[in-house]
Image (tube, rainbow, N blue to C red):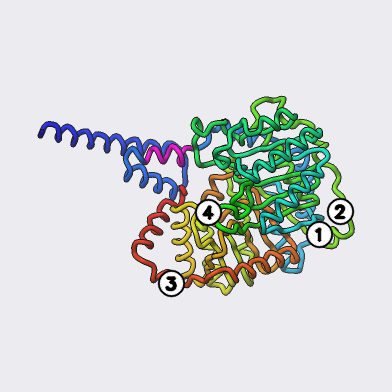
Amino acid sequence: MILTWNVIKWLLITIVVINEIAALFTVFREKRDIAATWAWLLVLLLLPVVGFIIYAFLGRKLPQRRLERIKSQTQLKLKQAVDRQKVQFQNMPKPKHSTAQMYRRTVMLFQSLDNAFLTRHNNVKVYIDGDKLFQQLFADIEAAQKSINIEFYTIYNDQIGNELRTLLEQKAAEGVEIRVLYDSWGSMGVRSDFYNGLRKRGGYATPFLMTHSNFIDFRLNYRDHRKIVVIDGKIGYVGGFNIGDQYLGRVKKFGPWRDTHLRIIGGGVYSLQQRFIRDWNASVKHQESRIKHFRRFFPEIKLDKSQLRNETSLQIVSSGPESPQENIKLGYLRLINAATDHIWIQTPYLIPDDSVIDALQVAAHSGVDVRIMVPCKPDHPFVYRATQYYARVLANHDITIYFYENGFLHAKTIMIDGRMASVGSANLDFRSFKLNFEINSFIYDRNMTDKLEQIFVNDIRSSRVITPEMFANQSRWLRFKQTFSRLLSPIL
C-alpha cells in the first residue's frame, strides 16, 4: 500500500513537472502580447493537462499559410482610387471647422491603416429589429438579377436559416450567381451538405479559411466574425445580426434580440464587395472557384433624388489577425480621443484592453459624458463576468453604465458628439481587436449619428443604471468570479 502511494506521488510530481516545462515551451514559442502570455501561463500551470485541452481550442494560432491567403489577395482597383484620394486629402488646405478637421484626420487614419476608401454618396438605413431586417433583406434577394454574395459568422440550420437557403436555391435556379461564405465554428451544427441543393443549382458555399470539420480544426480563435451581404453589387448590408432564429427573438434563453445593422446603397457597397471577394478567394481551395473577372461585381450605382437628400459619407474598415495593427480598435480610439462632448457605446462584450480603458477614463475625467450599455444577461459565462468586472472599473471613473434589460443587447455601436459613429461586427473586447476577422462602417454624418443616438436614448428606457455603490454591494462570490474572469480576459 505504501509502495502504491509512493508511485502515485511520484507520478503526480512527474506530471506536474512535465506540465510546467510544456507550458513554458508552449506559451513562449509563439509571439504574444504580455497580457495573453501571462493569462495562458495561469491556465496551463494551474490546470495541468486540462489547461492544454483548453489551449487546443483557444490558444493555437492559425497556420501562417492560411494568413498568407488573406494577405496575398489584392485589393483590386479600389487601392488605386484610395491612393489618389490620399494625395487629394494631403494637398487640401487644412479645414478651419472642428468637425471637418475631425472627419479629415479620421479618414486619413483609415486610408493609411486599411486603404479604406471614403465614399460620400450613400443612402443608409438603420435596422434594430430582426423581423424588419430580414423582411427587407429577403425582398432584396428576391429582386436580385445578377449576383448575391453572403458572408456571416453564423448561419444556423433553423427556421430562418432554411428560409434563406431555400430562397438562395430559387435564385440560383434563375441563373443568379450565389456565393455563401460562413464560419464553420460560428455555424456549428451546419454541415457542408446543408448547401448541396444550392450547389446543384449552380451556387457556391464554402467555410472561411478553415477545414470543413471542426473535429479536425477545432480552434475557437481566428474566426470570421464579419457579416456582409452584397446584392447585384449595388445593395450592401453590414452590422451585428447573424442568420439564426435567436436573432429574431425566437430563443427563450435570450428573449427579444436587440441589434444594429445597416443597409447601404452607394459607394460603400464597393468596399463591402471588395472585402467579400478577398475573403472568398482566400477561402476556396481551387483556382477555378476564385472570382477573377471583377468588373461585373462593381456596376455603376446611381441614387435617385429621394436617396440623395439623405446621403451619408462613410468608410468600410476591416481588421483581422493577418494585419500587424488592430485597425478597428485604433478607429475606436480615434473616436474616443476626438470626442469633446459625449461618447455613447453599446457592446455585448465589454473587455477592453488598457489603451481603451485609459482613453475612456481620460475622456470621462475631462468632462466628456461617457455612457456604456451592456446586456443584463450572459450568453458566455466567463465573458459576462469579465464584462461585469470592467463595467465596475469604469463606473468608478465617472462613466455611466447601463444594463439593458429588454432581452439581449448585441449591438456594436459608438457615437460621439452627434458627429461621428461606428456600426459593425466588432465588439469592445480583446477577441474582436486581436483574434477575429471583423468589419465596421465608420460614419461621418450628423443626421445618421443623430438617428443612432436616438436609438441609444430609447434603449435607456429599457435599461438600468448600475452605480459604483451597487457594484460595491455585490456578493464576495460574484466579485471573485468577476475578478477571476478578468484574469482570463486576453484569451476570452
The mark found on residue 429 in the picture is: 4
Q: Is residue 2 left or right of residue 269?
A: left
Mark 3 lies on a secondary structure that is helix
> What residue sits 77% from the left and 44% below the top?
141
Please give the residue where the numbered disc 1 appears in the rendered image: 311
Kind of residue at badge 3: Met
Kind of residue at badge 4: Asp
Kind of residue at badge 2: Leu
Q: Is label 2 in contact with label 1 (beta carbons under 8 Å)? A: yes
Judged by depth in the image, the label closer to the viewer, 4 or 2, is 2
Kind of residue at badge 1: Glu
Of labels 4 and 2, earlier in sequence is 2
Judged by depth in the image, the label closer to the viewer, 1 or 3, is 3
Q: Is label 4 in contact with label 2 (beta carbons under 8 Å)? A: no
Please give the residue where the numbered disc 3 appears in the rendered image: 470
Of labels 3 and 2, earlier in sequence is 2
* Residue 55 magenta-highlighted: yes
Q: Is residue 30 left or right of residue 334?
A: left
Q: Residues within 10 Å of mark 4 (few under 14, many from 20)?
A: many
Q: Is residue 308 left or right of residue 191?
A: right
Q: Position of residue 144 (x, y in %)?
A: 81, 42
* Residue 52 magenta-highlighted: yes
The mark found on residue 36 in the picture is: none
Real-space Cα separation, disc 3 to disc 2, in angstroms? 51 Å
- Which SS type dominates the magenta stretch? helix
Mark 4 lies on a secondary structure that is strand
Asked whether the viewer can see residue 319, the reply is: no
Real-space Cα separation, disc 1 to disc 4, in angstroms? 31 Å
> What residue sits 75% from the left and 38% below the top?
76
